[in-house]
Structures are given as C-alpha cells and as structure tokens.
Amino acid sequence: MKKIFGLFLGLSLILISGNLFSQDLDALLNAQTKPTINYATATFKASRIINGHSVQQMKKKQLDFRISHRFGTLNEGGYGLWGLDHSNIHFSLEYGVTDWLMVGLGRGSNHKIYDSFAKFKLLRQSTGAKEMPVSLSFLTSVEAVSEHFPTTPIQLTPTTTTPRINYFSSRLTYVSQLLVARKFNNKFSFQLTPTYIHRNFVPTELDQNDIIAMGAGARYKLTKRLSINAEYYYTVNPNAKYLDTRYYNSASIGIDLETGGHVFQIMLTNSQGMREGTFIPQTTDNWLDGGIHLGFNISRVFAL
C-alpha cells in the first residue's frame, strides 16, 4: 500500500512540475513574441530639406550649429564671378529640449533678420503594434527685421507730407506650418508642408499681409552618406506684380553629404532668403532667366 501511495505521489509531483514548467515556457514565448513598434528613422538627413524645415528634429540635449550661405545669381556672369562676389549668411543654434520639442534662434544678413522657432513632433511613422502611415510635426516661428526704418516723410500730395511713424510690430512676421512626411522605403522620402505667413507690415497695398503656400520636398538616397533633395513652394496668393518687381515660387535642388558629425547641403535655388518669411513670399529670381543662387548649409551636431 505504501509503495502504491508513493508511486501516486511521485506521479502527481511530476505532473504538477511539468504543468508549472509548461506555464513558464508559455510565458517566456509570449514575452518573446510580444508585438513591437517599429518607428521610421532618418526620413530626412537634416532638420531642413533645403530652405524649408523637414520633420527631422534634434534628439533630447542635442545642439545643432548651422551656417548657411546663399551667393548671388549665376546670370551675373564673369564680372560677378557668377554670383560668388555677393553672398548672404545665416547662423543658427537649434536645440532638442525633449525628443518631441525642438527650438532654435538665428540671425541672417538678408534684411538683418533675427528669427526664432519651435517645432513639435505630433505623430511618428511606425509599423507593428502601432500603425502610423506618416510623421507629423507643427512649426511656429517669428522673424524680426532689424534694418533701420526709413526716415523720409510720407508724401500725401505734391505739396503735403506727414511724418513717418514706425512701430516695432511692423518688423514682425509670423509663420505656421504643418510638416507631413512619409518614408516610403530606405531610399525615398516625401513631405508636404502647408504654410501660413502673416506679415504685420508690407511695402504697398498691392502686397499681401497673409500668404498661404503649399510646400513639397523629397529626398532620394544614393549611397549611405549621399542623397539628392528637391523642394518647391507654391504660393496660393502671391504678391501682385507692381513696377518692375515680379515674384516667383521658390524652387530648389541639392545634395546632402554626411561626414561624421557634419551634414553638408549644397544646393541651387532661385531664393536668396533662407527663412520662410522671405523665401516663400519674396523670391524675385527666375530659374529660366538664370536667376539661380549657389548655396550651402553646414550642420554640426553636439551632444550636451
């Protein structure tokens, strides 16, 4: 009887331990096969496609020091060394406050503009446990022209003038953008950028205070460190043509070259301005007439 009881007890222990081992094995397998989220990375190589912003942002505690140049137009010919005799420059510091918030400050020689911006990451393209077809960011910026105000009186009639009153608010331009991008594969990325610009002051009544535009940008990766980029901004309600000034949509093409902690962007563009408040509504050069500017951006990232 004791042998039978011992045999029954042994079989029970084997069954219980086998069941516990099976439960542990099931838990381990479930943990290993738990659904994961795969986020798209490097949709664009830098925080700008060419002139305009991309959905890329600095990671938390990363600082990007950027230097940008735009030379004169190629149609200046040999006398102006095809535009190299003239140049505009812009410096900026751009910092990742968090992984979803990036801020920046800059100063450019074109109209002596100071600018600041904040870029918020709202959605991130992903597959797996969370399906998100696009990345989405929101950008808001302020630009301030620091050139001296004109001091000449305003001519009301051939014999009557009035003193010119200048307000600080007249220097300000506000920009709001949605950045909607998708990385289709390891080589090709595309972005749409609906844009709203408000300028507190415009030179004439024929100019628009409020500008609406649609930007489109693309990147095609040629090698591990080299890509070709293109960018175009269509202005829905451009400034009217007056006197000898005519405005054109901003169009640019260039390459990105990564070398360690630097990203070099070399481009051809018909825009001399390097911030949205200038290159979108105030591009006055035409590709077809040789109004093309050679330019470059240099980006150096520091981890703080």
Image: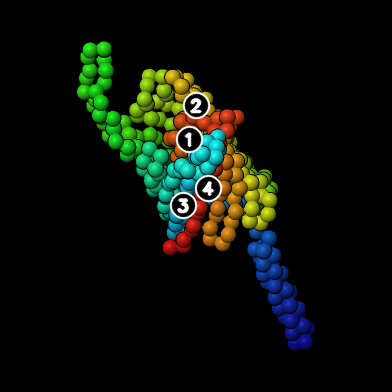
Residue under the image location 49 percent in, 31 percent down: 283
| Camera-nearest label, 4 or 3 | 4
Q: Which numbered disc, 4 or 2, marks the residue that appears first in the sequence?
A: 2
User: For mark 3, what is the residue?
Assistant: 66
Image vertical order of residue 290 relative to residue 226, above or below = above
Residue under the image location 43 percent in, 31 percent down: 197
Q: Tell me how far mark 1 sits from mark 3, CA to CA.
A: 18 Å
Numbered label attached to residue 279: 1
Residue under the image location 55 percent in, 37 percent down: 77
Q: Which numbered disc, 2 or 3, marks the residue that appears first in the sequence?
A: 3
Asked whether, in this view, residue 78 is left or right of residue 207, the answer is: right
In contact (CB < 8 Å): disc 2 and disc 3 = no
Identify the element where label 4 is drawn.
strand
Identify the element where label 1 is drawn.
helix
Numbered label attached to residue 296: 4
Amino acid type, residue under disc 2 in the picture: Tyr
